[in-house]
Amino acid sequence: MSNNDREERKKWAGLLALIILLLLGLWLFSRCNNEPPPPKRKKVAKKIVKKAPPPKKLPEFIEKREYYPTKELKTIYYVFRVHPDVKHKTCTGYYKSGKKMYKFTYDHNAKSGLITFWYENGKKAMEGQFVKDKRDGEFKEYHPNGKLKLAYTYKNGLLEGVWTEYYDDGTSKMIERHFKHDRLDGKVTYFNKSGGEKFHRTYKDGVLMRFAGK
């Protein structure tokens, strides 16, 4: 075989190989284009979990109000929210005019601590102490002009010791009594406004023993 024939063969062989490569490339390209695209991923919305608000703290006490038949405020007091029949904290009473009449404190339905009454003119009428719903300690009452009217002492709910009543000047004694276990015991003396004794009586365990005049 001549050199020209060999060259011609090589040329055609190379051309054939190129054609085969082109056909193979076209086939691969067409196959890639015919394949369906990969499915799109659906976007999943993120669920926003809302935190539950903290439970509302309920008040420990509930305010109660009472009114006169004519609708004016009469009393304000407090009860436990979970025990509405149990009074606790302050209790305040009012005149129909709106002026304060009295104020004291409840401790589980029992009066406890200072108790104060006022006249409608704002002057103090009475004050004293309660312990577990019983009067205990010194009590004082006043004339409407604010001067001392009565001074006496309780012990565990019973009158004990000297009980004194004053004229409206607040200093001159009118009557002086002595108590023991809530009973008159000893002299009961009546005074005139100048301080002199008018007469007296004597008691023993609440029983009148004798009467003496001046």
Image (cartoon, helix red, strand yellow):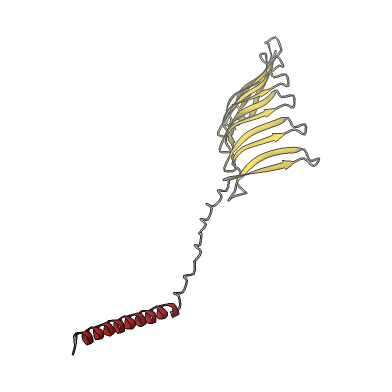
Residue 176 lies in quadrant: top right
Percent position of residue 128, x then y? 61, 28
Position of residue 187 in the picture relative to residue 19 (left or right): right
Image position of 142 with respect to 28: above or below: above
Q: Image point 62% across, 34% down: which residue? A: 104
- Image point 39% across, 80% down: which residue? 26
Q: Position of residue 132 (x, y in %)?
A: 56, 38
Q: Quadrant of the N terminus?
A: bottom left
Looking at the image, residue 23 lies above or below residue 67: below
Q: Image quarter for residue 206?
A: top right
Q: Quadrant of the C terminus?
A: top right
| Residue drawn at (40%, 78%) of the image | 29
Residue 80: image location, x then y, percent: 59, 46
Left/right placement of residue 86 relative to residue 2 reads right
**45 versus 166 height, above or below:** below
At x 66% / y 35%, what residue is drawn? 92
Occupied quadrant, residue 118: top right
Of 165 and 197, nearer the camera is 165
Residue pushed farthest right? Answer: 70
